[in-house]
């Protein structure tokens, strides 16, 4: 008879854990997708700015290359934010110089 109580306790704690863990895991997954979406958008915008710029800037080119490498390696939201930041800085450099 004691094993019924033990099994009930395990089920109770397991369901409580799942009730807490599942929403947190979903939220993290959403944050990761949103961060990577923003990073890919920033990289694409920087590429457009690079193509529209009259001159090439080695610093901005290096930043964009680093952002692309981070994006290729994937990672969590922190990596996505870093890639987006690098791409945005490169975009600002190209955006401030010699557009047609």
Image (spheres, helix red, strand yellow):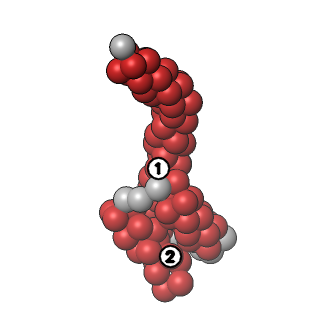
Front label number (1 vs 2): 1
Quarter containing the C terminus? bottom right
Kindly identify which residue carries mark 1: 36
Give the distance between the C-alpha atoms of the residues marked 1 and 2, in whole angstroms. Answer: 17 Å
**Crowd class of label 2 (few under 14; some 14 to 19; many from 20; radius 10 Å):** many
Residue identified by numbered label 2: 63
Q: Specify whether residue 2 is in view.
A: yes
Image location (x, y in percent) of residue 64:
46, 71
Residue name at image x 52 percent, y 41 percent: 28
Q: Nearer the viewer, residue 45 or 24?
A: 24
Q: Classify 30 as above or below 87.
A: above
Q: What is the total number of numbered labels drawn onto the structure image?
A: 2
Outermost residue on the bottom side: it is 58
Horizontal and vertical percent position of residue 26: 48, 33
Q: Tell which of 62 and 26 is nearer to you.
A: 26
Q: Is residue 27 visible?
A: no
Position in image of residue 63 (x %, y %): 50, 76
| Residue drawn at point x = 35 percent, y = 21 percent | 3
89 to 42, vertically: above or below: below
Task: Please say if the residues under marks 1 and 2 sit with CB atoms less than 8 Å apart.
Answer: no
């Amino acid at each position: 008879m004691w094993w019924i109580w033990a099994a009930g306790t395990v089920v109770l704690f397991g369901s409580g854990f799942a009730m807490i863990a599942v929403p947190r895991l979903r939220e993290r997954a959403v944050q990761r997708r949103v961060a990577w979406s923003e990073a890919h958008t920033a990289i694409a915008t920087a590429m457009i700015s690079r193509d529209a710029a009259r001159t090439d800037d080695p610093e901005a080119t290096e930043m964009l290359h680093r952002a692309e490498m981070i994006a290729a390696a994937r990672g969590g939201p922190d990596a996505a934010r870093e890639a987006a930041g690098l791409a945005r800085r490169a975009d600002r450099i190209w955006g401030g110089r010699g557009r047609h």
